[in-house]
Amino acid sequence: MSEERPRTHTPTVIVPRWIQLVTLPLFLLGLWAAARAAGPVLLLFIVAAVIALVLNPLVRQIQRARLPRGLAIAVVYVGFFTAVGGAAVLLANPIGDQIATFRDNVPGYIDDANRGLDDFQGWLDRHDINLQIKSGGQDALDRLEKDVVARSGDVLGFTRDLIEKLVAGIFALVLVIVISVYMLVYGRTIGDATRRMMPPGDGTPEDDFPTRVERAVAGYVRGQVLFSLIMGASATILLWFLGTIGVFPDGRTYAVFFGVFYGLMELVPFIGPVIGAAPPVLVALFQDPLTAVWVVLAFVALQQLEGHIVAPNVFGRALRINPLLVIFALLFGAELYGIIGALVSLPVAATLRETVVYLREHLTLEPWPSVTRPLLPVGLSEPASAQLHDGDDRRDDAEDDDQDLHDDPETRQLHERGF
């Protein structure tokens, strides 16, 4: 086995105090103003950069087969779109059929819920509990029925607004693909320019800033996609199993639809699993509260499996960011650019974290001068302390004079005795 080459120590760059005081705050304000002014344009470049960082390792792997970089990029994109298109073709018909079935069954779910409200209202009346929930509950259920049916129709039908949004989305997707392709083509140039802007490393891949950022972002995105696929498939199998054994019959009917939705929600950390489990729990609640309890318990067990087995093995320490900062990044991205901003906020957070870590290793802030005053003895003011020091100095001078006058040991001894 070859020994690992030790990392050489590189001198850190000292940041002067005037840069700390003036330039850094102005740079941060300018960056924020540019982000606000750029709007969707900046979002397109961020998404393209994330895609390029994720695909660049695959491009390098294909280049090892002695293919030109341009051809390697084309192979990666063809394989990527083939995989996405194949998955869409395989899932389109089952999901479409299950959405249509769900829309047709919504009135029946509302009727079951109304009967449950009637039974609960009767129980309250029999026990002389003056609480009226029937009328308010029925109004809420009626509104829910109309809303769900209308939104299901929007999913299946192609209205004018939907077509406009679809065209805008396709245009944005084409732009993202084109930008990401150019980023991959000029990846080496972009990497060299980034190295010139950052403090120099020690020459190893472990201390190369572009490589570190690529590993952080690509590792997180690949791990998140794999994690979502595993959890979506697990939710589909779980719901199908509950429907097969009769605990939740509709679980088998909507297994693929609910599983895909749960997998997509897993892309959003922390709150995604709760949102993903909401539709099957609500459907089970409309049928029977006890069935809803079983579904909730099943998803709690699935999330325990997710947190203790799947996530540690898939992610490891891919992101390594405080959960509070993760939630802040999600809310910040959603506030700026909506759901797409929330999805790309975590790769951006991984990039920022790696940048901060790299700069902390290679930059040293010039220390600010600190003025310290000597500690005074308790009960003494500064003039008294000065007088004390003056007296000590005079006493030391007198002792030196005595020593000079009485060099003879016997004479000095008599002098010390007072003679």
Image (tube, helix red, strand yellow):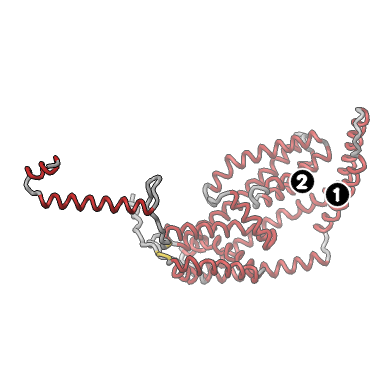
Tag shown at residue 183 = none
Under mark 1, the amino acid is Leu
Q: Residue at x 47, y 59 (%)?
A: 212
149 shown above or below 198: above
| Residue 408 located left or right of residue 294 | left
Q: What is the CA distance from the residue labelled 2 to the residue labelled 1? A: 13 Å
Relative depth, front residue between 163 and 38 = 38
Pinpoint residue 227: horizontal percent, then vertical percent.
Answer: 61, 49
Type of amino acid under label 2: Pro
Q: Quadrant of residue 117?
A: top right
Q: Position of residue 169 (x, y in %)?
A: 71, 66
Give the mark nearest the N terminus, 2 or 1.
Answer: 1
Give the side of residue 382 with respect to residue 161, left or right: left
Q: Please state the horizontal and vertical placement of residue 116, each as a whole percent of the image.
A: 88, 36
Write down the residue under mark 2: 279
Q: Residue at x 41, y 61 (%)?
A: 369
Q: Where does label 1 land, which residue?
A: 144
Q: Report the label total.
A: 2
Report the residue that reaches farthest toward the front: 419
Discs 2/1, front: 1
The residue that appears at 83% across and 64% down in the rendered structure is 159
Q: Are marks 2 and 1 in contact (CB under 8 Å)?
A: no
> 133 or 347, which is in the foreground?
133
Q: Helix or strand or loop: what does disc 1 sit on? A: helix
* Residue 44 visible somewhere in the drawing: no
- Which quadrant would the C terminus be assigned to in this image? top left
